[in-house]
Image (spheres, grey):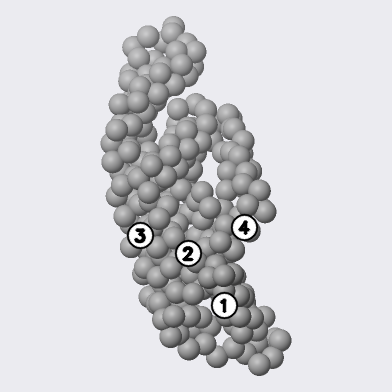
Amino acid sequence: MVKGGTVLDLYDILQNHIGIFLLILTRVSGIFIMAPFFGSKNTPAKIRAALSLAITLVLFPTIMASGMKVALPMTLLGYVVAVASELFVGWVIGFVAYLTFAAILMAGQLLDMQVGFGVVNVLDPTSGQQVPLIGSFKYNLALLIFLVTNSHYIVLTALVDSFTIIPIIGMHLTTALTDLMIAMTWGTFTIAIKISIPIIFAIILMDVALGILARTMPQMNIFVVGVPAKIFVGLFVLSVTLPFYILFLDVAFHEMYTNLYNLLRTLS
């Protein structure tokens, strides 16, 4: 009876606040569009929808118990605008989280061009796109570290805190958002350069050595020697710097945490 009463109480709450419930569901669904792991394309849409609903059912009583005052729009157009704003909040949280992984793919593209794998791409099942070979390796490794270190809780924590920082139908777009997005996009290029700089520097030294060798031994076919040599040097440096790459991911995920909360404060 108690269990049945609890279900009926929850049904009554949902019936009286269905508009607020749908807005919460919309914001939660936003992270399942773009966020790493949560927005993976190889996860069926029904599972992502079920997870969105489950998270919303957990958050809804907490948000209602906090005493948040929500004035729902009285017109259909106003409610549609509210739904769009809540979806944008969830989507932009996932987008900021994805920027770190976009930087990893960009670094992989730079490394593939330098090492000699520029024409070799593989299909990434999480995004459904062709990605560079080394970039795919670094991306999947970063995703594993992301899950093993429970960094995906960062995204969920930011989502939960967003209802405190940005009340429902409380988002405000300002010019500060543009400046912040530009800064975070520039940070994506910075992360990509930092990840790829050791191998790029090694390949530059390799090119200098091959140039000197070509001048001293003109009869040697540098193209035949240089291509496998670059691949060998690139993979060797990649293996040597791998522990440092894992340590760098901790810094990158911490920066992601900072960017998420800077974004939420900007939208509030």
Q: On the picture, is 45 further left or further right than 259?
A: right
Residue nearest the viewer, comparing 104 with 264:
264
Tell me which label, 4 or 3, sits earlier in the chain.
Answer: 4
Q: What secondary structure is marked by label 2?
A: helix
Q: Which residue is painted at 52% across and 28% down in the image?
A: 117
Q: Amino acid at mark 1?
A: Asp
Task: Find the residue positioned furthest to the top.
Answer: 219
Task: Provide the residue designation for mark 4.
Answer: 50
Q: What secondary structure is marked by label 3?
A: helix
Quadrant of the image containing the C terminus = bottom left
Q: Amino acid at mark 4?
A: Ala
Question: Residue 264: where, in percent of width, then height?
Answer: 41, 72
Q: Amino acid at mark 3?
A: Tyr
Residue nearest the viewer, comparing 105 with 97:
97
Q: Which label is found at residue 257?
A: 3
Residue 236 lies in quadrant: top left
Q: Which label is found at residue 9?
A: 1
Q: Amino acid at mark 2?
A: Ile
Question: Residue 160: where, in percent of width, then height?
Answer: 43, 68
Q: Which residue is painted at 47% across and 44% down in the image?
A: 106
Marks 4 and 2, how far apart at CA: 19 Å
Tell me which label, 1 or 3, sits earlier in the chain.
Answer: 1
Tell me which label, 1 or 2, sits earlier in the chain.
Answer: 1
Q: What secondary structure is marked by label 1?
A: helix
> How crowded is the residue under tag 3: few (<14 C-alpha within 10 Å), some, or many (20+)?
some
Residue nearest the viewer, comparing 230 with 165:
165
Can see residue 160? Answer: yes
Task: Find the residue positioned furthest to the bottom.
Answer: 74
Closer to the camera: disc 4 or disc 3?
A: 4
Q: Which label is found at residue 93?
A: 2
Question: Residue 63: where, in percent of width, then height?
Answer: 46, 77
